[in-house]
């Protein structure tokens, strides 16, 4: 089965490290994954996979997550796959 690299690396999505950073922030604030999922209106499975670094989110979702926790998006600048970076990765 042939795979398409373009589907593996999407423009404006997060690296797995972003979820792990969010997990640390939630722990420091005493917010459980379940509480956060309910606040966001997201399925708990989705949130737990994201926090474990096993699920990436699109940029617009990252913005919403940051807004909910009152975090500046720039804290995650190194955790975002931008279009230019994605093109370089596909040419390796």
Image (cartoon, rainbow, N blue to C red):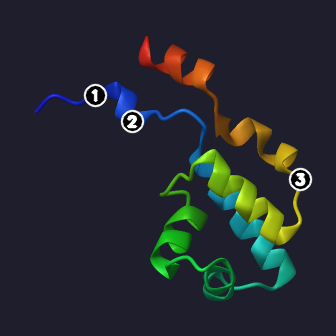
Q: Kindly check if marks 3 and 2 are in contact, taking CB atoms under 8 A apart as contact.
A: no
- Left or right placement of residue 6 versus residue 48 in this view: left
Give me the residue at 53% from left, 14% from top. 88
What's the CA distance linking mark 3 and mark 2?
27 Å
Helix or strand or loop: what does disc 3 sit on?
A: loop
Give me the residue at 83% from left, 49% from top. 73
Mark 2 is surrounded, within 10 Å at the Cα level, by few (under 14), some (14 to 19) or many (20 or more) other residues, namely few
Residue 1 image point, x, y percent: 10, 33
Identify the residue position indicated by label 2 in the image: 8
Mark 3 is surrounded, within 10 Å at the Cα level, by few (under 14), some (14 to 19) or many (20 or more) other residues, namely few
The quadrant of the image that shows the C terminus is top left
Q: Kindly check if marks 1 and 2 are in contact, taking CB atoms under 8 A apart as contact.
A: yes
What's the CA distance linking mark 1 and mark 3?
33 Å
Identify the residue position indicated by label 1 in the image: 4
* Residue located farthest toward the left when viewing the structure as drawn: 1
Residue 43 image point, x, y percent: 49, 79
Identify the residue position indicated by label 3 in the image: 72
**Chain-order first, disc 3 or disc 2:** 2
- Left or right placement of residue 70 versus residue 2 in this view: right
Helix or strand or loop: what does disc 1 sit on?
A: loop
- Number of numbered tags placed on the structure image: 3
Give me the residue at 28% from left, 28% from top. 4
Give me the residue at 66% from left, 51% from top. 60
- Left or right placement of residue 78 versus residue 61 in this view: right
Residue 11 location, quadrant: top right
**Chain-order first, disc 1 or disc 3:** 1
What's the CA distance linking mark 1 and mark 2?
7 Å
In this view, the residue in front, 37 or 55, is 37
Residue 37 location, quadrant: bottom right
């Amino acid at each position: 089965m042939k795979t398409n690299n373009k589907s593996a690396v999407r423009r404006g999505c997060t690296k797995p490290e972003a979820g792990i950073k969010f997990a640390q922030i939630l722990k420091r604030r005493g917010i459980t994954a379940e509480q956060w999922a309910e606040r966001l209106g997201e399925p708990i499975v989705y949130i737990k996979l994201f926090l474990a670094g096993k699920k990436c989110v699109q940029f617009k979702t990252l913005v919403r997550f940051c807004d909910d926790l009152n975090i500046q998006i720039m804290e995650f600048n190194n955790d975002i796959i931008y279009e230019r970076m994605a093109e370089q990765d596909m040419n390796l």
